[in-house]
Structure formats: C-alpha cells, structure tokens
Amino acid sequence: MNGHFISFEGPDGAGKTTVLQAMVERYQHRLKDQLTVTREPGGNPISEAIRTIILDKNNTEMDARTEALLYAAARRQHLVETILPALEKNHVVFCDRFVDSSIAYQGAGREIGPEEVYEMNLFATEGELPEKTIYLDIPSELGLKRIMTHRTEDVDRLDLEQLDFHQRVRSAYLNLAKKFPERIVVIDASQKLDDVKKDVIEVLDKILN
Ligand code: TYD
C-alpha cells in the first residue's frame, strides 16, 4: 500500500477539529480526490449509528466496557469500509481519532486500563495503525476552559466529565507519545492557532511532499 494513513488526536478542547479542517483546506487543492477525510466514531452509516448511541447524553447507564466495545466495533467497520479501501487506492487518509483515543479515553479516562483496551482493539484493527499521528497536546484546565467558552450548545456526554478525567486522558496520550516516538508527533496546542497550524504543516509536508 502506498497511501498515507494519518490520524489526528487530542483531548477535548485542543482545537483538533479546527486544525484538521484547516489542513483539509490546505491539502485538498493539491491532492484533489486522492484525499479521504474521515472521523471516528463514524465515517460510514453503521459507525455513525454506533456514534449516536455512544454520544447520546441520555445513555447515562452505559458501562465503560460497553462503551469501549462500541468504539471498537465502530472502528472495525470504519477500517474495512473506509480506511483500507482508501489506502488501497493510494489515498492520503486524514482520520479524526483512531485507536489512541480509545486507549486514552476508555483505557485511562474510564480507568479500564490502557493495555487492556489496546489488546481488545487488536481484534478490531488486526494491528493496523496510522503511519503518523498528529497529537495536539493541551493542559487539561485550558482544554476544559475552551470547551466551556466555545461549545455551550453542543456539550456532549463526554464533555461533562470532570477535570481529573481530562487529566487522565492527557497523561495517557503523553505516555503513548513516549512509547511510540516515531509514530506520534506532539504538537503544542496551547499556542496561537496559526503557530499550531504551522507545526502541523511542517509534519505533513514531510510526508506528503
Ligand atoms: P470527537 O467528535 O472527535 O469530538 P471532538 O470534536 O471534541 O474531538 O469525539 C467525540 C468524543 O468521543 C470525544 O470526547 C472523544 C470520544 N472518543 C472516545 O472516548 N473513544 C474513542 O475511541 C473515540 C474515537 C472517541
């Protein structure tokens, strides 16, 4: 496969959606229909339906392992229906979250255990990992502050978690970055947006030029 599988990760409030959108605008001109932009949980009707169940704020009864299994199920379908076919066509795939999100959110945030969540996800991914992961790092207090100011009408179930949840998520991401320094690039997302974008472009240009 000659495509490029690139994931974007980060705790809530890191500005991932904004940065990813800016990168799509920057690269789609050059890549045209060779760029596939997709997100987890989602990317196809089955995974989007699972996403609706997971993020429904009325589902307060959801067990942490049920949640982890649903993310993994959505991921499996996303991988076989969207990501792998795109890579086979030599596309560049920009993927908003992948397995690192489950390790950080379910493994550390929900305290199932990062290793256990990774192991369980192997059934879904068969070991498939992004070639490069752009991790937008933000101190938890600042991330939460951004969510509160920007997203008053769109606060989903997970955004309502406490500060310590966000701190556990962040430190899991930083551990992953230490464990996979070749794959995961840590970008300081507390900088001004233009500087964050510049750092991300530097990484992407190296892969895509
Ligand atoms: P997302 O739509 O990426 O939210 P945002 O735009 O704020 O980044 O993801 C929604 C939520 O799903 C987010 O809080 C993280 C969570 N999530 C997990 O907990 N585990 C996972 O495996 C994935 C993919 C997402």
Image (spheres, helix red, strand yellow):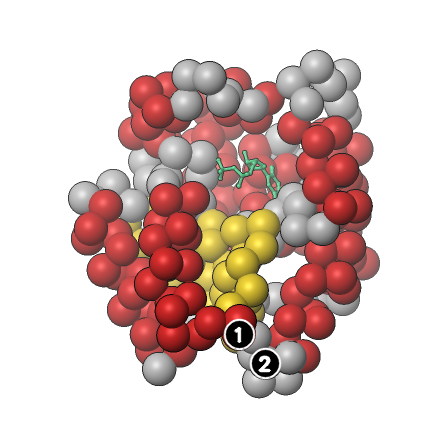
Mark 1, residues whose alpha carbon is within 10 Å: few (<14), some, or many (≥20)?
Answer: some
2 or 1: tag closer to the N-terminus: 1
Residues at discs 2 and 1 in contact (Cβ within 8 Å): yes
Image quadrant in which you'd find residue 130: bottom right
Report if residue 131 is visible in the image.
no
Does residue 78 sit above or below 86 in this rendering?
Answer: above
Does residue 103 sit above or below 177 in this rendering?
Answer: above
Side of 195 where 18 appears, left or right: right
Q: Position of residue 148 (x, y in %)?
A: 37, 19
Which is nearer the eye, 64 or 29? 29
Of badges 2 and 1, nearer the viewer stands 1
> On residue 34, which mark appears?
1
Mark 2, residues whose alpha carbon is within 10 Å: few (<14), some, or many (≥20)?
Answer: some
Local SS, label 2:
loop
Does residue 110 sit above or below 160 in this rendering?
Answer: below
Q: Check disc 1 and give the amino acid type.
A: Gln
> On residue 67, which mark appears?
none
